[in-house]
Image (cartoon, grey):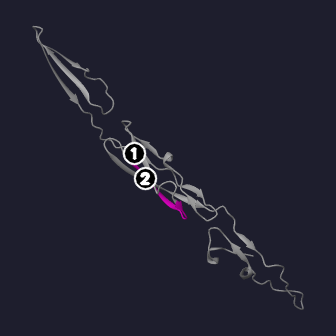
Amino acid sequence: FTFTQTPPAGTQLSGTAVQAVSLEVFDEAGSSATCNFNITPTDTITSTITCPANQQAIVNGTCQNVLADYTSLAVTADNCGTSFTVSQSPVPGTTISSDQLITFTLSGGFPSTTKQCTFTVELIDTTAPSITCPSGPTEYVNSSCDFVLPDYSAGILWSDNCESTISNMTVSQ
C-alpha cells in the first residue's frame, strides 16, 4: 500500500482560512480510494492593545481643550493579522476642562476580542494671569524716616483663564 496526502504532512499553513486536505491510498493492484475533508484552523490567541504614556494638551482661553483623536497612538497586535478597530472614549471632539482619563477599546479580531487600556490627557495652562497694580500709592515715613510696607494684595485686580477665585491663586509681593 502507498499513501499520499495533499498538501503533504509538514506543510506550513498560515491564517484561519478553511484548508482542504485530500488523502489517497493505492493498493498493490494499482486501485485507489480518495477521501477529502476540511481543516478549520482556530486562533485562540487574542489581539492586544497598549496605550501611550499620559499625554499633555494645552487649554484655550476659557481653560478648556477639545480632545484630539489619539487612536493612532495605540499599539495593537494580532498573531494572525486579523482586522479590528480601536475606539476612543470620550470621543475626539469632546470638550474637557480638567484632566481626562481616556479609554481605548480594541474590538473585533478572531476570536472576537474586546480589550481596553487607559491613559490620561493632562491639561496644561500656558496663559499667564493678568494683574493690575494699585496706582502709585503714597506711604508716609515716621520720624526715623522709616515706614512699614503694607500688604497691597487686597487692592489688586487680577484675572486668569483657569482660576476663578483668589483662594486658587497665589499672590506675592
Q: Give the range drawn in magenta.
A: 95-106
- The numbered mark at residue 123 is none
- Would residue 82 be found to the left or right of residue 26 on screen? right
- Badge 1 is on which residue? 48
Q: Residue 165: x percent and y percent?
A: 62, 76
Residue at point 81%, 85% (across, down): 148
Magenta stretch encompasses residue 32: no
Quote the CA–CA distance across marks 1 and 2: 10 Å
Label 1 environment density (alpha carbons within 10 Å; few <14, some 14–19, many ≥20): some
Residue at point 39%, 43% (across, down): 84
Label 2 environment density (alpha carbons within 10 Å; few <14, some 14–19, many ≥20): some
Query: Is the residue 71 above or below the residue 81 in the image?
Result: below
Magenta stretch: dominant SS? Answer: strand
- Would residue 7 be found to the left or right of residue 108 on screen? left
Mark 1 or 2 closer to N-term? 1
Task: Pick out the residue farthest to the left.
Answer: 29
- Between 3 and 81, the one nearer to me in the picture: 81
Q: Residue 172: x percent and y percent?
A: 72, 75
The N terminus - image quarter:
top left
Query: Is the residue 68 above or below the residue 127 in the image?
Result: above
Disc 2 marks which amino acid? Cys
The C terminus - image quarter:
bottom right
Residue at point 23%, 30% (across, down): 39
- Would residue 166 be found to the left or right of residue 20 on screen? right
Task: Pick out the residue farthest to the bottom.
Answer: 143
- The numbered mark at residue 117 is 2
Residue at point 52%, 52% (across, down): 53
